Amino acid sequence: MALAVPSTLDEAIDAVAGAPDAQLLAGGTDFCVQVSFGLRRPTGVVSLRRVDDLRGWSADSDTITIGASTTYTAMIEQLTGLLPALAGAARSVGSPQIRNMGTLGGNVATASPAGDTLPVLLGLDARVGLAGTTGRRSVALHDLVTGPKRTSMLPGEIIVDVTTRRPRGPQHFLKVGTRNAMVISIASAAVGIDPEAETVSCALGSVGPVPLRAPQAEAFAASEIDWAAMTASDSALARFGSLAASEASPIDDHRSSAAYRRAAVAVIAERGLRRCLRDAG
Amino acid sequence: MPDSPDAHIDGSTVPWSSSNDFDLTVDGRSRRVRGSWLGETLLYVLRERLGLPGSKNACEQGECGSCSVLLDDVVVCSCLILAADAQGCTIRTVEGLSASGDAADVQDAMVRCGAVQCGFCTPGLVVAIYDLLRHSPDATDMEIRESLSGNLCRCTGYGRIFEAVREVQRGRSCARL
């Protein structure tokens, strides 16, 4: 096995270009487990640890751009004000040790259906910035994640950053698991409202092959909310949850059953919308 | 993939290393690692190649925290780091914290409060508690629980461990007066 430790993005692109089979290594929280358990025997690893170009974040009036190497801890410490739901999702990941290591770019690239930042990013119409030998491109997260742990990234491409729209209202992330720490989501939801545009976003995790939006639930809630009073009837809120559940496509697996996941989505979607209305009211 | 040590791919500016020998900075000393496979974790190298068995190997997937170390002053699971990728980083193990005396009151409190039974999780907890209290000396009960949520104990029970944390806080707050 060979290891490359580039210190700039250009060097990293060069390193991967010369070794297309090489594994990119960011926080290592997924990859090192696979190696230790003998599931992966990498021939080459390109470590992104020293690539400063992938760190930090910036914001303008419409968007927020977050470097791929931003750790969950950094999201909690630095982005709670701008992106509270992202910080909330980050805080629900693993343990302090894991959050000190795992990165936003890693969560996106791993493309697990249970990746906790993904519903939040999807709800904020995130785009992923990629770099490779042929240059830079930007892909909607929705188009990047194509299946469970599958992406449309091309060989040799590196995730540089993730850009979200700036929320113009509250957004909440809710997650169901067996305890509050060290748990992989059984179901998750990121629900947000934009009181100015009078729109609702509802993105779901762990209840489909990829994180997904629930457009029928979103449109229904937008039409039912009294935007002047920031309220909705109990029956409309419950119907919003049911619609979100019907738009999920969960499966039975070792973590939970499809039926439980669907029931959980109805509860957390409704609860998320209630919290948004409470915050905006 | 180049297989000769420190080869450069044509046109590449980045050296690839396949050398199985490299240096790590552990507890203030430069340590030579010899004959390592580059896929070995920092935990494995600390325990099996550098004779530092304080960091415990239990889950090898970041679940249990018993391998906690400080990497560039940040608490991490050493089972989730490739040792070769930690070259140039500052690594502090429970052995180093113990020898320096920096975690002495944490260790004493754990013994006094009966927070050690089988002892397997103890080194990781010492590292995690040391890290918590230097950042949040007045951590609340909820903060203590969240900070130690990645360190599993399966026999002592957490009550005595939390009591040990509070004992350290009391001792340090008296020392500050």
Image: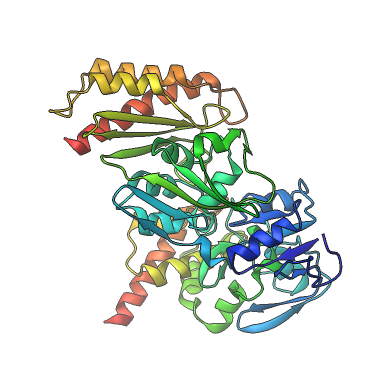
Instruction: Judge left or right: residue A43 versus residue A233.
Output: right
As rendered, which of A198 and B62 lies closer to the eye? Answer: A198
Scheme of image coloration: rainbow
**Residue B59 visible in the snapshot:** no
Residue farthest toward the front in the current orientation of the protein: A134
Q: Is residue B93 above or below residue A258?
A: below
Q: So how many labels did they put on this image?
A: 0
As rendered, which of A256 and A43 lies closer to the eye? Answer: A43
In which quarter of the view is residue A89 placed?
A: top left
As rendered, which of A193 and B31 lies closer to the eye? Answer: A193
Instruction: Judge left or right: residue B62 versus residue A242.
Output: right
Q: Is residue A172 above or below residue B93?
A: above
Q: Position of residue A213 (x, y in %)?
A: 44, 28
Residue at the (32%, 67%) spot, across then down: B138
Residue at the (49%, 24%) spot, across then down: A261
Instruction: Judge left or right: residue B172 versus residue B92.
Output: left
As rendered, which of B174 and B10 lies closer to the eye? Answer: B10
**Residue B80 visible in the snapshot:** yes
- The quadrant in which the C terminus of chain B is found is bottom left
Q: Position of residue A22 (x, y in %)?
A: 74, 54
Q: Is residue A74 above or below residue B94?
A: above
Residue at the (46%, 60%) spot, across then down: B161
Q: Position of residue A270 (x, y in %)?
A: 32, 25
Q: Position of residue B35 (x, y in %)?
A: 84, 71
Residue farthest toward the left in the current orientation of the protein: A229
- The quadrant in which the N terminus of chain B is found is bottom right
In which quarter of the view is residue B5 placed?
A: bottom right
